[in-house]
Amino acid sequence: MIELMDVRKVFNAGSPSEYSAINGVSLHIPENKVTVLKGPSGSGKTTLLSIVGCMSRPSAGRVKLRDREITSLPERFLTDIRRKTFGFIFQQPNLIKGLSVLENVMLPAYPLGEKRSQLKLKAHNGLQELNLANKAASKVEWLSGGEVQRVSIVRALINDPHIIIADEPTAHLDTKLSHRFMEIIENFKAHGKTVIITSHDYRRSALLPTLERYLVSCLGPLYS
Ligand SMILES: Nc1ncnc2c1ncn2[C@@H]1O[C@H](COP(=O)(O)OP(=O)(O)OP(=O)(O)O)[C@@H](O)[C@H]1O
Ligand SMILES: [Mg+2]
């Protein structure tokens, strides 16, 4: 489904702070599977996800999505692909302050023009699934770290994306909620979705016992 060919990413190229975060990663991410990218902190997992999710471009190499080369597409096409294909659970969720939990969750769906009443219902159901029903009207700045992470999970799923990209999604969750998240992920897979998760914490990725695991070792040394 997603093919990376000799992908490199250099930050601040040509300046004294030039830093090569990814050095020639080639990788196939299969459809309808859960792929776990493991690697130590700083090994380039978030950088790689941002390239896979069309949020940044590689400095070199090529990326294909469903056999379509996307590396050099103009920005407006990338935005469109991003919106319609991916749901992002970011490591730093950057929810919009001043807006309620419900409004934050609904936000990514506005450009796609779904009926507001339908959207609201979907958002409420999503919040309920992650024990957040009573927080729908709260401002996001009042939430705890784990609540922020759960809101960002609900937000990522609002457009029913084909591909879910989750960057350390359980880092701030307790064991029970982590298991709930993993159930949601399993459910995605059962519905034919593709999931890409990162984890620098070996014990956390061991939380995925029932999932097929594709552990990718190209991002620096593995813990196991
Ligand atoms: N915009 C940037 N400018 C300069 N360096 C960057 C930039 N973004 C990331 N880096 C560097 O690239 C390296 C990889 O960062 P990245 O965030 O991809 O790591 P990671 O594997 O996700 O780490 P973690 O497990 O801590 O989240 C890091 O050393 C980071 O400092
Ligand atoms: Mg990261």
Image (cartoon, rainbow, N blue to C red):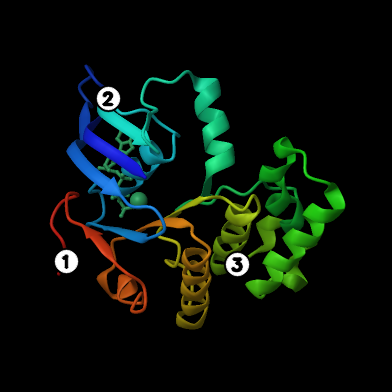
User: How busy is the neighbourhood of tag 2: few (under 14 within 10 Å), some, or many (20 plus)?
Assistant: some
Name the residue rendered at 39%, 53% in the picture: 31
Residue at the bottom extreme? 176
Name the residue rendered at 43%, 21% in the picture: 73
Residue at the disc numbered 1: 223
Residue at the right extreme? 117
Whole-percent x and y of residue 81? 53, 34
Give the position of the N terminus as an image quadrant.
top left
Kind of residue at disc 1: Tyr
Q: Secondary structure at mark 2?
A: loop
Q: Of circles 3 and 1, which is in front? A: 1
Q: In the depicted view, which residue is nearer to us: 36 or 69?
A: 69
Q: Secondary structure at mark 3?
A: helix
Looking at the image, residue 219 sits to the left or right of residue 101; the answer is left
Tag shown at residue 190: none
Residue 138 seen: no
Whole-percent x and y of residue 120? 80, 56
- Mark 3–mark 2 Cα distance, whole angstroms, equals 35 Å
Residue at the disc numbered 3: 147
- Mark 3–mark 1 Cα distance, whole angstroms, equals 29 Å
Query: Does residue 10 lie above or below 181 as drawn?
Result: above
Residue at the disc numbered 2: 59
User: How busy is the neighbourhood of tag 3: few (under 14 within 10 Å), some, or many (20 plus)?
Assistant: some
Query: Does residue 95 lie above or below 60 as drawn?
Result: below
The quadrant of the picture showing ligand 1 is top left
Kind of residue at disc 2: Ser
Name the residue rendered at 78%, 53% in the picture: 119
Whole-percent x and y of residue 224? 14, 70
Q: Which image quarter: residue 55?
A: top left
